[in-house]
Amino acid sequence: MIVMKFGGTSLGDGEAIKRAADIVCHTLEDKGEVVVVVSAMSGVTDVLLSAATSAARGNGETFRRARWALSDRHRLAMTEAISDEEARLQLMEEVEALLSGFESLCRSVHILGELTARGSDAVASLGERLTVRILAAALREKGVTATAVEATEVIVTNGQHGSAAPLMDETRETARARLLPLLAEGVTPVVTGFIAAAKDGVTTTLGRGGSDHTAAILGACLDSDEVWIWTDVDGVMTADPMVVPEARTLPEISYAEAAELSYFGAKVIHPKTILPAVERGIPLRIVNTFNPSHPGTLIVAEVKLSELTVKGITSIKGLSLVTVEGRGMLGVPGIAARVFTAVAQGGISVLMISQSSSEQNICFVIRQEAVEDALRALEAAFELELARRNVDRIWAQDKVVIVAAVGAGMKGTPGIAAKVFGALGKHGVNVISIAQGSSEYNISFVVDEGDMEDAVRYIHQEFGLGLCPEPASS
Ligand code: ADP
Ligand code: ASP
Ligand code: MG
């Protein structure tokens, strides 16, 4: 059995939906059983969420316009992908009913002037609820007995709106109870990615980009042979091809490397996708809907020995570097604990930490949108020290990025850091802060947002990543 997920671009219009349906048909012929997971059409989740946010701020127009724009886009896709008129008309009714639900939700948000986390998840879930129906209909048109399934009936979460975590034991039970009988009857389930439900049935989402995670959760719960992620590039590459056009596909990487690459910004795979796959040893394959004959990237526990020490260069934008500094911090125990407790209590996650050996400052990187909250939390926690001048300053530098060089071959290989920073020095790129994970699978550092592309390209070039592709795996 294969669980395969199609991303937003892979379902971006009627043609893409037909292509996805063809891929499912071929895999069914080849492998026998397929469970399909779908994202919303590209950009739809953004439109839904920004309409609801602007409704909460008092804008009564944006959500109405968004409803009609979404209606037009999905209608056009249905016209292209579904030729049977009766099937299409019935589908259009279902789509309009969902979009009318979206408008009602936004109207309530507008009246209340508030968008709760629960409301936000209800709105965000609509994109996948639309595509799941369209792809199932496109498959039926090709003679596949396919049915749309809402993941609220399949994945049970801890109820944390916006970034819910699956409860794997419960999910294993519900997923098997809901999906295995369908497969046994020869039905292909087409399941909404990204969404799930808490124990009480309320809709939750798994976090932005979370459809990859859905596919891995289902793969693990159904003991599938493999999980395939269909996207718009030829697999996991040595860098984002949008930044480095000569980036190459990595034919095979380990779970650990995939985890580091995705954590440090390789958006092609959501970081949470790896864990369910690792736990059950299920291989993940990243493949291109627009180039399906390309083997893409295989992600497994153990990979063949590689000549590449550094395999990929990644970056994360939209960050701030927060610094707590003061001569009075020298040798005082517990400062770091208090810094990170204050930040954690504000629900803010820290992406990278570094402390200079003189102990006179601690700096860490967070998402820019959390910076006001972080500064407020730290100022409250260190009120006394600030007054006594033991802590001189708590401040943030906005518009920074983390760049990371990742690869398992870096472990124990001397000279990697020298090569990374040598390349940056040679080209005059200023490094603001540095960290190396103890796994030695990555070296990450902070640069100004304006230097991001140069930093990625120079390091990519320095390690010859665009020049020496590894032989394709079979
Ligand atoms: P989907 O909608 O299919 O989930 P995403 O947009 O989430 O697709 O992820 C695919 C994109 O990830 C690519 O178009 C590419 O620009 C970006 N990307 C970033 N880093 C990498 C990388 N190292 N390898 C491949 N793609 C990457
Ligand atoms: N549609 C969701 C998002 O845009 C989930 C996904 O595409 O994976 O975040
Ligand atoms: Mg994605």
Image: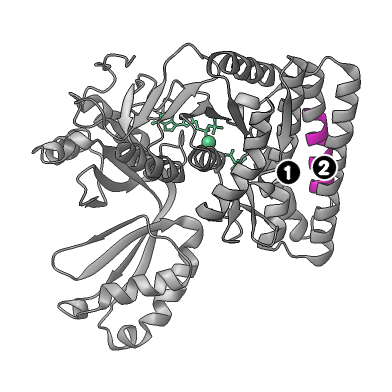
| In magenta segment, residue 269 | no
Q: Which residue is mark 2?
A: 98
Q: For the point 46% across and 33% down, which residue is it?
A: 268
Element type at mark 1: helix
Q: Tag 2: Cα neighbours inside 10 Å, few (<14), some, or many (≥20)?
A: some
Across the whole image, how many numbered discs are drawn on residues?
2
Q: Assess whether mark 2 and mark 1 are in contact (beta carbons under 8 angstroms).
A: yes
* Residue placed most toward the observer, 298 or 185: 185
Q: Position of residue 321 (x, y in %)?
A: 36, 58
Q: Ligand 2 closer than 8 Å to the CB at disc 2?
A: no
User: Which residue is at 73% across, 31% downward?
Assistant: 147
Was residue 71 drawn as part of the magenta stretch in this picture? yes
Is residue 292 positioned above or below 404 on the image?
above
Identify the amino acid type marked 2.
Leu
Residue 40 is at least partly visible in this image? no
Residue 424 occupies quadrant: top left
Q: CA distance from mark 1 to mark 2?
A: 7 Å
Label 1 packing within 10 angstroms: few (<14), some (14-19), many (20+): many
- Say which residue label 1 marks: 126
Q: Is residue 320 above or below residue 395?
A: above
Residue 84 in the image: x percent, y percent?
86, 16
Does residue 472 sit above or below 168 in this rendering? Answer: above
Q: Which residues are magenta?
A: 62-73
Side (left or right) of 397 relative to 318: left
| First in residue order: circle 1 vs circle 2 | 2
> Does mark 1 have its CB less than 8 Å from ligand 2?
no
